[in-house]
Each structure stands twice: as structure tokens, then as C-alpha cells.
Image: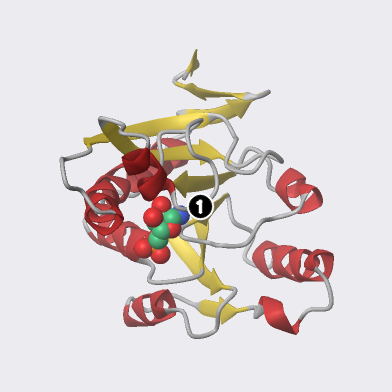
């Protein structure tokens, strides 16, 4: 199973994939790491791991569609079985998403369907939620709305700041994301219509 990972920032989720592969917990190879920001720290992590990197600076494209088309071509060049969005902070258009339907996952730092979009931790704190977390989901045309694969829950502690809660959630992200990719690589996780299925059972 060949994976291409898309990043925009620190790449801590990328690092979790690199570490899982090194421990033999990921029956897949990371063919390339692609960032829309040429200076993303995650690119350094890929280089240190000897993984091919590419940067496609979205600010150098005339339009969102032009960027999406170039990114699609770049990814197809690696012929991946699975595309992993890991802290990738671009909204991808319907054509792009359709092209990778059923073989593109994202991780979102909330218990979807609660809090799609940004500032998820502060929103959970402001709402007085007792729990927060992260969700791995298949990517569909609906932003942060694709069929969930794995949820990870953490308690919101009294006096939590968004930063504190984010670090507690990130720890869980680094556990569930490589696990979801492992299931996909093992052929146990599929997108069937608009439902994710694990071992043939709806999730
Ligand atoms: C994480 O909160 C992740 O849930 C979101 O982007 C943030 C940064 O991820 N998608 P990373 O450290 O760059 O992997």
C-alpha cells in the first residue's frame, strides 16, 4: 500500500506515520510528503526520514482550481493507494475530492459532526463540553463532513486552555490516524456509498 501524505505545518501527524512505519505497525510505504507551504516544518521531518518531498505553493497559482489540478497531477505521479491529509489546511474542490474518493482520509480535531471548521478546541471549551477529541474520516465533498472512521475522546479539564486541550487531543490523533491507515492498508476499511465500513460492518 503506497501512501502520499499532504501537510501544511508542523507535521506531528506525519511524524506519527513515520514512527509507526519504522516500528512495522504500518503495512504501507510513504511514497512522498507534499506541502502547500514550502517552509512547512513537516518537510524537514520527511527529509530526515529519507522520504521524497514536494512543495506546491498555493499562492503561486491563479486560482483554487489551478492549484487543485496541479496537486492532483503531482499526487497521481506517485500512484498512491491512499492519500492522507495531515494538518493540510487547504479546502479541496469537488473534482479533486471525487478523483480520490474512497482513498483519501483526513483528521479533524473535534468529535465530528460537532465543530467542523476552525478553532475547535476553544469552541468546545466555550460550550462547556465535558469531552473533546479528534475524528478520522473519509474525505468527501462536504468539508469536514465525510463518513467517520475513528473518534478519539479526551476529557475537557477545568481551566483548560485551547492549547492544553489541543496537546491532549494531538496525543490521541497520533494514535488513531496511523491505526486507520493500517486498517485501510489491510483492506479492512472501505468507503461504501456514504458509509465507512470496517470488516464489512458499517461504522
Ligand atoms: C492537528 O490538530 C490536526 O488535527 C489538524 O491539523 C493540526 C496540526 O496537525 N488537521 P500536524 O501537527 O501538522 O500534523
Query: Which quarter of the figure has residue 21?
Result: bottom left
Element class at badge 1: loop
Residue 52: image location, x then y, percent: 49, 77
In this rendering, position of residue 60 left or right of residue 143: right
Q: Is residue 107 visible?
A: yes
Residue 167: image location, x then y, percent: 24, 55
Q: Can residue 14 be seen in this view?
A: no
Q: Name the residue under label 1.
A: 118
| The residue at label 1 has a CB less than 8 Å from ligand 1 | no
Q: How is the image coloured?
A: secondary structure
Seen in the picture, residue 162 relative to 186 is either above or below; the reply is below
Q: Residue at x 60, y 29 (%)?
A: 191
Sort mark 1 into few (<14), some (14-19) or many (20+) by Cα contacts within 10 Å: few
Seen in the picture, residue 82 relative to 102 is either above or below; the reply is below
Q: Which residue is drawn at 40% across and 74% down?
A: 42
Seen in the picture, residue 20 relative to 12 is either above or below; the reply is above
- Seen from the viewer's position, the closer of residues 120 and 178 is 120
- Seen from the viewer's position, the closer of residues 165 and 199 is 165
Query: Which quadrant does ligand 1 occupy?
Result: bottom left
Q: Residue at x 51, y 54 (%)?
A: 84
Amino acid at each position: 500500500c503506497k501512501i502520499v501524505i499532504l501537510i501544511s505545518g508542523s507535521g506531528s501527524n506525519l511524524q506519527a506515520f513515520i514512527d509507526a512505519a519504522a516500528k512495522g505497525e504500518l503495512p504501507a510505504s510513504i511514497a512522498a510528503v507534499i506541502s502547500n507551504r514550502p517552509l512547512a516544518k513537516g518537510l524537514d521531518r520527511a527529509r530526515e526520514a529519507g522520504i521524497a518531498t514536494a512543495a506546491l505553493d498555493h499562492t503561486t497559482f491563479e486560482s483554487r482550481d489551478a492549484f487543485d489540478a496541479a496537486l492532483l497531477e503531482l499526487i497521481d505521479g506517485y500512484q498512491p493507494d491512499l492519500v492522507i491529509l495531515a494538518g493540510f489546511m487547504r479546502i479541496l474542490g469537488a473534482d479533486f475530492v471525487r478523483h480520490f474518493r474512497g482513498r483519501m482520509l483526513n483528521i479533524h480535531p473535534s468529535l465530528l459532526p460537532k465543530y467542523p471548521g476552525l478553532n475547535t478546541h476553544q469552541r468546545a471549551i466555550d460550550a462547556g463540553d465535558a469531552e473533546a477529541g479528534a475524528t478520522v474520516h473519509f474525505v468527501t465533498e462536504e468539508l469536514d463532513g465525510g463518513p467517520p472512521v475513528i473518534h478519539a475522546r479526551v476529557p475537557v479539564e477545568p481551566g483548560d486552555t485551547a492549547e492544553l486541550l489541543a496537546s491532549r487531543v494531538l496525543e490521541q490523533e497520533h494514535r488513531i490516524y496511523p491505526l486507520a491507515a493500517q486498517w485501510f492498508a489491510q483492506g479492512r476499511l472501505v468507503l461504501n456509498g456514504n458509509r465507512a465500513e470496517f470488516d464489512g460492518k458499517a461504522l
